[in-house]
Every structure is written in structure tokens, then in C-alpha cells.
Image: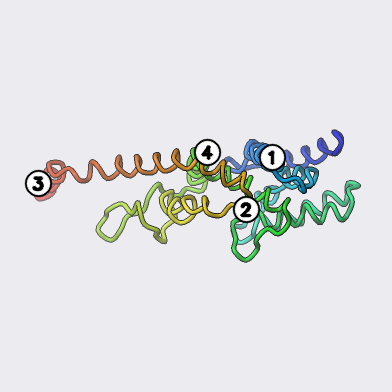
Amino acid sequence: MTAESYKKIEDFMRSSMDECAHDIEHVYRVLYNALIIAKDEKDANTDVVTAAALLHDTGRPEQLENPHLCHAQVGAKKAFGFLTANGFDEGFAKHVSDCILSHRFRKDSPPKSIEAKILFDADKLDAVGAIGIARTLVYNGQTKRALYALDENGSPVLREENSDDSFFREYNYKLKKLYDNFYTDKGRAIAEERRKAAEDFFNALCLEIEGPRKQSDIKDFITENINE
């Protein structure tokens, strides 16, 4: 890929990104991760990997405006249209589009080519470890979701999946399960290096939320004052 081609794709990406958790820096981290993984995959087309990584989240603004839309589907169409309109080969554009279409964590649309698998893993690396925790909390704040939900007794639901949108639901439902869903050896190895940081943070957060509620003297004080 020429410097001119890269700049053209990069400029389009930068004009399309307008979200905190899925921002321009997220795109660059995915790009760097993708190129690191691609070094271990001798058959990977790094031009396709580069273009797909840069453009993979260009459908985010549409999904943010209309949650019923899938940013992967929107982004795949946008990427294909942009690339073919700017002189890129149609076969190249289709390959990039297919990578973007399958980069989202969905069982009904798994990545097939090595380039698509690289993009999938690179994107998921930004959802594991400490960076995954941080981005999830930022996204929850942006979308006004709670840190945790309460059960029918008013107790925090922290270690189980539940139907209420919250950070803890996202962690239990998705984040902690990502480590078993990597396609490349390099992606899986990097993810494992980051696992402990996420688990330690989650466990510490649980203890800090549950701890004060379990102190009998505090509970007795509250009960006594309420009864008065």
C-alpha cells in the first residue's frame, strides 16, 4: 500500500469516528494489534488487514444514532463504497468489506479468511485486559448504563448474568468469555497475557461493593434508624 493510499483511507476513517469508547485511538490500537498478529501469518495480505483495521468501525455513528443497525454491516457497505469510489480494485474492496462484516462478535457471521480472523482478533484484544475494562466503563457512561443492577431484595448482582444493562452484565455476559474465542495463536497469546489484569480488577470491584454491605454493625445501624 502506498503512503497516498494509506492517507486517503486514514482521512476517511478520521472523518467517520465520533464516539468515546470506539474512537480514533481505538482504531489505531486495533491496527497495531492486527499488524503484530499478521507478522505471524505468512499468507496474510497486510494491505487488506491495514485497510480493514482502519475502516472497521466507520459504521459506529449510524449504530449509535439507531441501535437497531449493526455497525459491522453498515461499515462493510461504507468501506466498499468508499474504496471503489476512490480507485481501489473491486476485489480488494470486497475483501476488506468482508473482513469488516465479520469482525463483530456474532456466531452467525464468523470470519473466514485469515485477514478477517486477524481483524477479529485485533479488535477483541481491545476488549480484554485492562483496556477492555476501561473502554466498557467509558461506553457505559456514554450510554447512561449503571455500574451494576439490583435483585428483588435490593442486593447488587455482580457475579451472574442478568437482563439489566450494566458493567457487570457486560463483563459476565461477554468480556470474561472472549479469551476462548480467538482465531490466531498470536492473538490468543496476547489475550492470555492480559487476562489477569481484568480478573483482578473485577474481583477487587466486587469486594469493594459487597464488603460494606456485609458488615453487620452497619446493617444494624441502618435497620435501627429506619425502625425509629
Give the residue at mark 2.
183
Mark 2 or mark 3, earlier in chain: 2
Crowding near the residue tagged with mark 4, few <14, some 14–19, many ≥20 C-alpha atoms within 10 Å: some
Mark 4 or mark 3, earlier in chain: 4
Estimate the spatial distance between the alpha carbons at disc 4 and disc 1, rounded to whole Å. Answer: 15 Å
Crowding near the residue tagged with mark 2, few <14, some 14–19, many ≥20 C-alpha atoms within 10 Å: some
CB-based contact (under 8 Å), mark 2 and mark 3: no
Disc 3 marks a residue whose amino acid type is Glu
Q: Residue 31 carries which label?
A: 1
Residue 138 visible in this rendered orientation of the protein: no
Residue 41 visible in this rendered orientation of the protein: yes
Of labels 4 and 3, the one closer to you: 4
CB-based contact (under 8 Å), mark 3 and mark 1: no
Disc 2 marks a residue whose amino acid type is Tyr
The outermost residue toward the bottom is 108
Q: In which quarter of the image is residue 152?
A: bottom left
Estimate the spatial distance between the alpha carbons at disc 3 and disc 1, rounded to whole Å. Answer: 58 Å
Mark 4 or mark 2, earlier in chain: 4
Position of residue 194 relative to residue 98, above or below, is above
Q: Which element carries disc 1, helix, strand or loop?
A: helix
Question: x, y (%) of residue 192?
Answer: 51, 43
Give the residue at mark 3.
224
The outermost residue toward the top is 3
Question: x, y (%) of residue 103?
Answer: 66, 54
Give the residue at mark 4.
131
Residue found at x 87% / y 36%: 2
Task: Work out whether residue 66 or residue 113 is closer to the camera in this orientation and state it.
Answer: 113
Disc 4 marks a residue whose amino acid type is Ile
CB-based contact (under 8 Å), mark 4 and mark 1: no
Task: Work out whether residue 76 or residue 175 is closer to the camera in this orientation and state it.
Answer: 175
Of labels 3 and 1, the one closer to you: 1
Mark 2 or mark 1, earlier in chain: 1
